[in-house]
């Protein structure tokens, strides 16, 4: 079994006892997709957790990369997400089956509702969310998926689910870095045994030049990116940095050989500047605009199948 599943520092245990690697490789259609980088991450850097979404349009390429890496798909913790236009009892199941087919697996490790928003023409938003969540619960009961959760959900959105659900979400994935550190939301999730997972841990590179982060990096002889990822891990937040460059993928994985001091953690935990990379106010238009999945996908070094 891979080290990430045997070393307690390298995984978290969800409230249904599923082990989830605390460090993963993020993917998206914005910023490109590198087949070489995903293969390299799996084969050379020990990554065993990949995060994607149907919306990104790269699920089928991830399946190719896993195969090319020589790593068994059973050892890779795969997360993908259901886009709001697929919410609903039948459409969610169809979307789930489509993701499994493209990823080349029969079961998924984690399936998330991508956003709490729904198409603007829906009259009863909460009813649609609950119907969709019940479908995820059924997929879990049928052992088609090992864990289920949400993404970008705040406390009021979670309340809609928690008031009616049979299964409390295992994970809530949100933007997370020192300039976007939702402490109240994290406490809310912790009290309910919902594992917090963070995307954009490097703030899309916008915070790497922050003097206090660079000072901590210099003190530990590490890069600012490694400091930010290590901060995630010591907060026990699942972290999914993304990169299309091999050397960055490797650098991002080399974060288990040092530890931030209490004063370092206090500095990073109490940043006062606020930066939000993902603007939630733009999502409704994206949901209502009938653009295809992967519409921004930049294909980087993806092999052509014979």
Image (spheres, rainbow, N blue to C red):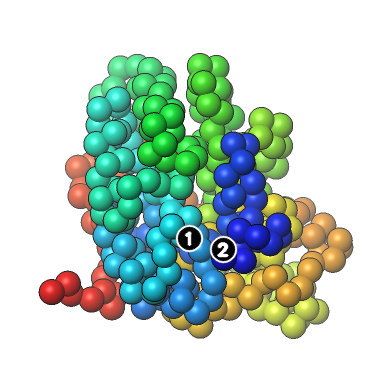
Q: What residue do we see at 86% from left, 61% from top?
A: 262
Pointer 2: what residue? 1
Above-or-below relation of 55 to 212: above
Judge left or right: residue 89 versus residue 25.
left
Instruction: Provide residue 233's location: percent of width, then percent of height.
Output: 68, 59
Discs 1, 2 touching: Cβ within 8 Å: yes
Which residue lies at the image location 65% right of the left edge and 60% below the top edge? 6
Q: Is label 1 or label 2 in front?
A: 2
Q: Position of residue 239 (x, y in %)?
A: 58, 58
In the figure, 282 relative to 69: above or below?
above
Q: In this rendering, is residue 1 above or below 85?
A: below
10 Å crowding of disc 1: few (<14), some (14-19), many (20+):
some
SS under mark 1: helix
Instruction: Identify the disc placed on residue 35.
Output: none
- The residue wearing badge 1 is 75
Depth check, front residue: 72 or 27: 72
Residue 108 x, y percent position in the rendering = 40, 47
30 up-or-down from 286: above or below: below
Residue at the spot x=55%, y=17% of the render? 163
First of labels 1, 2 by sequence position: 2
Q: Quadrant of residue 123?
A: top left
- Secondary element type, mark 2: loop
Viewer-proximal residue, 79 or 116?
79
């Amino acid at each position: 079994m891979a080290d990430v599943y045997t070393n307690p520092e390298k995984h978290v245990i969800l409230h249904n006892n599923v082990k989830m690697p605390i460090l993963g490789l993020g993917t998206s259609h914005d910023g490109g997709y590198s087949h070489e980088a995903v293969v390299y991450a799996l084969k050379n850097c020990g990554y065993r957790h990949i995060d994607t979404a149907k919306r990104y349009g790269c699920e089928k390429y991830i399946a190719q990369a896993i195969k090319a890496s020589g790593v068994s798909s059973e050892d890779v913790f795969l997360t993908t997400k259901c886009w709001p236009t697929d919410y609903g009892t039948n459409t969610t199941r169809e979307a789930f089956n489509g993701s499994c087919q493209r990823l080349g697996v029969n079961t998924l490790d984690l399936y998330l509702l991508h956003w709490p928003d729904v198409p603007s023409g829906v009259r009863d938003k909460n009813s649609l969310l609950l119907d969709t969540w019940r479908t995820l619960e059924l997929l879990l009961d049928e052992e088609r998926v090992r864990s289920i959760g949400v993404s970008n959900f705040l406390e009021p959105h979670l309340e809609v689910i928690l008031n009616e659900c049979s299964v409390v979400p295992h994970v809530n994935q949100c933007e997370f870095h020192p300039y976007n550190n939702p402490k109240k939301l994290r406490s809310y999730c912790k009290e309910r045994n919902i594992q917090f997972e963070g995307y954009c841990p490097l703030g899309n590179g916008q915070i790497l030049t922050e003097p206090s982060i660079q000072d901590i990096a210099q003190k530990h002889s590490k890069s600012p990116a490694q400091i930010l990822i290590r901060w995630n891990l010591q907060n026990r937040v699942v972290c999914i940095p993304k990169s299309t460059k091999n050397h960055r993928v490797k650098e991002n994985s080399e974060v288990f050989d040092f530890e931030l001091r209490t004063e370092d953690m206090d500095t990073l935990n109490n940043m006062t500047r606020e930066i939000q990379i993902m603007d939630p106010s733009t999502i409704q238009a994206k949901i209502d605009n009938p653009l295809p999945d992967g519409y921004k996908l930049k294909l980087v070094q993806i092999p052509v199948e014979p």
